[in-house]
């Protein structure tokens, strides 16, 4: 199943997490005596040479990456706690599981039980996806195959085009259907087109052949060769990740008739009807110039190749839920080859992720939902989310908004008219903490404790129906696009900034820590999300949530010059020998990181109300804010996961989310006495100052 298109900007490189990790009854911080694990630092390193290692070096050197993960970090420690808590919730819920159970707890328990019944799953082999594969075999025309692609949001079928429903960026009072390019089994077009990924592409060919063999597809090796060649042609026609970041270029509304004229050769009516969008009159196209090429490619490709490709996509999308040979092949390709993970996670962890949501094999990036993720979120927050945390976060948000307001007013490069619009937009943001006000209704979702594949498709159908059924109604401003158990935050299309319960734990938020640490961690996260509304993409959305240019030409030019300067800095960073960060791809996240930490420092100063700042363990308040930020990013990835991240992820690797930010903030130089000659030193005139 392809993921929905979500018009939101995430904090990034993260995975499902937990609520507050520390014992609520304790008054001791989780890390050290005041919220920082000083034993994990390496203070023999000069802060001005490598601030990330200064704060984290000893921990990095002594902490191995677990064999069943592509990374290790303090954020993943949050995940481990969440997994344990969700495991306990689901184990307990199985006691309430009956066939066609009606309670929320029973449905969660039955779904988890269906995943954990590995003996039953092994006995079935490929039988659970036999109906989907038979449908492909019987779809002997391109029109029939296009109709199967229309099931991509409700079944395991793949599609050349991804469909999603979200707020209309030009008319935020209503929803719109968005259509974007798809069709690739590897993480990005570069994996097909660049020699650096030849090894991964060869492994992918073998993987497709294995899936087709396991699925009973004839001539599997030759078919796999055709499938990979087909996807390579799709990659050649597709836009790059950088091109996809432009919200103006990817907003192309048109009628379905105009879509048919733009991209003839694809059965759009059959495709949309299968998506339950047969009466659709208006649609927003993303990568406009790619659509005619993809449709022409589809029209020219032999039906047998498209059938084999669809069979491979079905097997790939379903492999996680099938017998061990499918799961082993999936692990070897997606986790081991692409991310460097050495050992498959134990079954109960995979079961937790299947029901609740979690890592989808992309390093630490959270890109997918669990099948009953919102139901699990309700059970989770009922048990683990402390109300006191919500109040503290709301106060921190208020302080950060005040700091941002003051910074915008003082900007020396922005004219009064643009400032006025920026301040108006800042004031419109709604802050959401913990969990949604309205829970998702699962009453009509049928869950059987012995039908895992059926549970997946029924849950997907109900989820898609939720979005389709509200398409013509008013926009729900209380809606969330991220589940409560998620360890992430986002700035969304509803002009909302959301902090799920899952992110409100150490090291991001510790109610028992020194306030400076919390400002450096959760404060900078809050500032990061606020800044996303004004990064290179977010700045194109106005105070009403509409895609509109509200900048004077001179102000826009000044912003772009500063952003370009920041992009050049990041493009010079080299996480691995010969592997550079793409400063254009990571632009929005880098701007948000810089703005977030800058705002957090300002807000910390405001919170002191002129009172003297205590020195703790020889560290000043400013030093503790900076080191709180650095500790929040403590962790490391395998080399393969880094390559994958740099190629396809809009977030910079964690070391550069620290070093790339602090060396642009004047107060960091003052706090740590950074001087010319230090490796991170940037002359004052060359430091990037945006917000």
Image: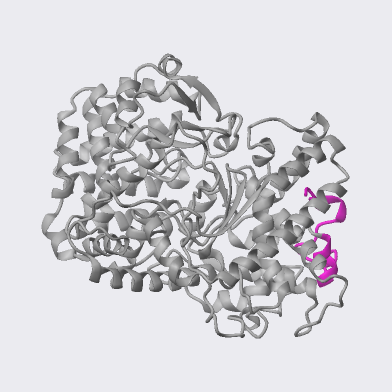
Secondary structure mostly seen in the magenta stretch: loop
Out of 272 and 138, give the one closest to the viewer.
Answer: 272
Magenta highlight on residue 603: no
Q: Is residue 221 left or right of residue 25?
A: left
Out of 159 and 231, give the one closest to the viewer.
Answer: 159
Identify the residue at image location x=42%, y=19%: 256
Q: Is residue 246 left or right of residue 78?
A: right
Residue 206 seen in render: no
Q: What x and y, as percent, mark residue 58?
A: 60, 79
Q: How is the image coloured?
A: one colour
Query: Splitting the image into 4 quarters, where does residue 527 fall?
Result: bottom right
Out of 584 and 593, give the one closest to the viewer.
Answer: 593
Q: What x and y, as percent, mark residue 533?
A: 67, 45
Magenta highlight on residue 684: yes
Q: In this picture, is 264 found above or below 226?
A: above
Query: Splitting the image into 4 quarters, where does residue 265 fall?
Result: top left
Q: What x and y, as percent, mark residue 329?
A: 26, 55
Out of 523 and 673, give the one closest to the viewer.
Answer: 523
Q: Which residues are magenta?
A: 666-691
Q: In this picture, is 12 found above or below 390?
A: above
Q: What x and y, as percent, mark residue 607?
A: 79, 68
């Amino acid at each position: 199943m392809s993921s929905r298109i979500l018009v939101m900007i995430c904090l990034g490189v993260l995975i499902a997490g937990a609520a507050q990790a520390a014992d609520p009854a304790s008054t001791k911080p989780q890390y050290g005596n005041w919220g920082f694990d000083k034993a994990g630092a390496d203070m023999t390193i000069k802060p001005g040479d490598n601030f990330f290692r200064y704060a984290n070096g000893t921990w990095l050197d002594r902490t191995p990456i677990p064999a069943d993960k592509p990374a290790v970090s303090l954020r993943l420690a949050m995940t481990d706690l969440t997994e344990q808590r969700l495991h306990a919730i689901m184990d307990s819920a199985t006691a309430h599981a009956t066939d066609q159970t009606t309670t929320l707890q029973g449905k969660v328990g039955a779904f988890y039980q269906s995943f954990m019944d590995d003996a039953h799953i092994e006995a079935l082999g490929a039988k659970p996806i036999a109906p989907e594969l038979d449908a492909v075999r019987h779809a002997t025309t391109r029109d029939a195959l296009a109709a199967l692609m229309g099931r991509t949001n409700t079944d395991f079928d793949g599609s050349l085009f991804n469909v999603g429903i979200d707020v209309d960026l030009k008319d935020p009072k209503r929803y719109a259907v968005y259509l974007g390019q798809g069709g690739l089994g590897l993480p990005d077009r570069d994996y097909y087109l660049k020699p650096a990924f030849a090894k991964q592409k060869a492994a992918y060919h073998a993987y497709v052949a294995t899936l087709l063999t396991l699925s009973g597809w004839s001539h599997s090796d030759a078919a796999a060769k055709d499938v990979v060649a087909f996807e390579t042609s799709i990659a050649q026609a597709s836009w790059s990740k950088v091109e996809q970041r432009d919200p103006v270029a990817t907003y192309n509304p048109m009628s379905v008739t105009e879509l048919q004229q733009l991209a003839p050769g694809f059965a759009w009516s059959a495709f949309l009807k299968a998506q339950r969008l047969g009466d659709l009159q208006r649609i927003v196209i993303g990568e406009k110039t790619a659509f005619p090429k993809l449709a022409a490619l589809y029209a020219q490709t032999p039906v047998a190749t498209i059938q084999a490709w669809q069979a491979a996509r079905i097997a790939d999308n379903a492999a996680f839920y099938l017998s061990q040979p499918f799961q082993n092949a999936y692990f070897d390709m997606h986790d081991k080859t692409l991310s460097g993970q050495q050992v498959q996670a134990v079954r109960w962890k995979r079961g937790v992720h299947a029901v609740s949501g979690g890592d989808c094999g992309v390093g630490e990036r959270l890109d997918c939902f669990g099948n009953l993720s919102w139901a699990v979120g309700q059970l989770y927050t009922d048990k683990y989310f402390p109300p006191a945390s919500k109040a503290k976060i709301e106060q921190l948000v208020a302080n950060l908004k005040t700091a941002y307001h003051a910074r915008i007013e003082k900007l020396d490069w922005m004219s009064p008219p643009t400032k006025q619009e920026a301040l108006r937009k800042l004031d419109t943001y709604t802050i959401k903490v913990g969990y949604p006000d309205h829970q998702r209704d699962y009453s009509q979702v049928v869950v059987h404790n012995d039908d895992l594949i059926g549970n997946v498709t029924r849950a997907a159908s109900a989820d898609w129906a939720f979005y389709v059924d509200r398409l013509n109604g008013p926009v729900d401003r209380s809606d969330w696009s991220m589940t409560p158990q998620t360890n992430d935050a986002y700035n969304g299309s509803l002009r909302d900034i959301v902090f799920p319960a899952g992110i409100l734990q150490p090291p991001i938020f510790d109610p028992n820590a020194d306030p400076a640490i919390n400002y450096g961690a959760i404060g900078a996260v809050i500032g990061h999300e606020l800044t996303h509304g004004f990064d290179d993409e977010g700045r194109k959305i106005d105070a009403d949530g509409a895609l509109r240019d509200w900048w004077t030409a001179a102000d826009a030019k000044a912003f772009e010059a500063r952003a370009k300067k920041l992009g050049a800095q990041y493009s010079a960073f080299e996480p691995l020998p010969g592997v550079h960060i793409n400063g254009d791809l990571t632009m929005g996240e880098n701007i948000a990181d810089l703005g977030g930490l800058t705002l957090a420092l300002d807000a910390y100063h405001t919170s002191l109300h002129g009172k003297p700042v205590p020195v703790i363990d020889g560290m000043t308040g400013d030093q503790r804010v900076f080191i709180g930020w650095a500790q929040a990013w403590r962790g490391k990835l395998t080399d393969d996961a880094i390559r994958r991240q740099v190629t396809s992820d809009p977030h910079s690797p964690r070391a550069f989310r620290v070093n790339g930010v602090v060396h642009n903030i004047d107060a960091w130089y003052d706090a740590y006495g950074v001087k010319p000659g230090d490796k991170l030193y940037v002359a004052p005139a060359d430091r990037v100052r945006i917000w």
